[in-house]
Amino acid sequence: MTDPEDHDFSEGDGFDDPYEEFDLDPPELDVDPDKVDPVDSRVVADLLDDQNVPTDEVDVEELIDVGLNYMNINRFEQAADTFERAAQFAPDDSKLEQEAWTNKGAAHAELEEWDAAIGDYREALRIDEDSEHAATAETNLAYALWESGRSEQALEHAEKAVEIDERFAEAWFNRGFFLLERGLAEDALNSIENAIRLGLRNSQVLDEKARALEELGQYDEAEEIAEEAEEMREQAEQELIEERQEQQEQR
């Protein structure tokens, strides 16, 4: 199961990396920085009022990018508000509206507001159960349901995510996690290995693979995988220490 900080959300359109060009003031909003703090959490909500900004003058894609930028700096409440506004201004039942609801669910999930997240993911899936954003919504919905104690429903939605996009590594991993929780180690291992083949290889994934191998009695291989997972954690911790040291030196 992906960590809470790893909830999937879209990457927006028009950028290879949506966070590289950080700008909380899309041109469509025409904010005067001398009058308004550009990182004021109320700016987006106040400016995007139906009485102030005509719908056809709002660039929903830009607004979604604003929300993604909020996500990147861990300002999840502001992100949720921004995505909600994007959903309101997007054409009804469009892919943009679905993307906004999916991302809003991810923002609530980061805040561990599971009921709100579940509602957002269900709204996204109501729009389209087979689109490019549906697999992400199903995967995230599965996680939110599991966190809410509804494990059987979680597995059901993890299965749907895989059916929608069989190349979605996170969906395979979540499916494997839920199967392992139900004692179906062999099927779980197959799903986790699919996730790894699709490029999802980190300490958490390897931990679950080791757990599945151990359940199947393959203790030697399980130990090797567990050691590899620990090495990856240690390397990540070392990189974090070095990064912090560099930041302190630059001050």
Image (cartoon, rainbow, N blue to C red):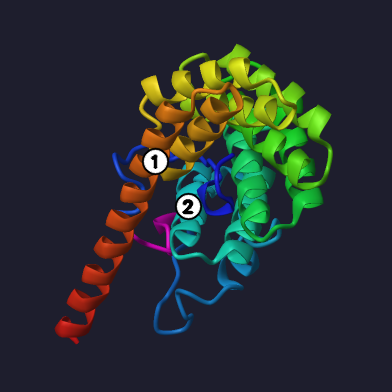
Q: Nearer the viewer, mark 2 or mark 1?
A: 1
Of 146 and 72, nearer the camera is 146
Q: How many marks?
A: 2
Segment colored magenta = 22-28
Residue 5 pos. (x, y %):
53, 54
Does the image show residue 21? no
Dot 1 falls on a residue whose secondary structure is loop
Label located before the other in sequence (2 or 1): 2
Q: Which quadrant would the C terminus be assigned to in this image?
A: bottom left
- Residue at the (81%, 29%) spot, across then down: 153
Residue 202 forms part of the magenta stretch: no
Q: Callout 2: few (<14), some (14-19), or many (20+) C-alpha neighbours within 10 Å?
A: many
90 lies above or below 194: below
Q: Main secondary structure of the magenta part?
A: loop
Residue 26 falls inside the magenta stretch: yes
Say which of 157 and 106 sits in front: 157
- For marks 2 and 1, give the CA distance: 23 Å
Q: Is residue 230 visible?
A: yes
The amino acid on which the numbered mark 1 sits, given as a three-letter code, is: Asn
Kind of residue sitting beneath label 2: Leu
Does the residue at mark 2 contact the one at mark 1 (Cβ under 8 Å)? no
Dot 2: element: helix
Q: Which mark is residue 202?
A: 1
Rendered residue at 45%/31% (across/down): 222
Which numbered marker is on residue 68? 2
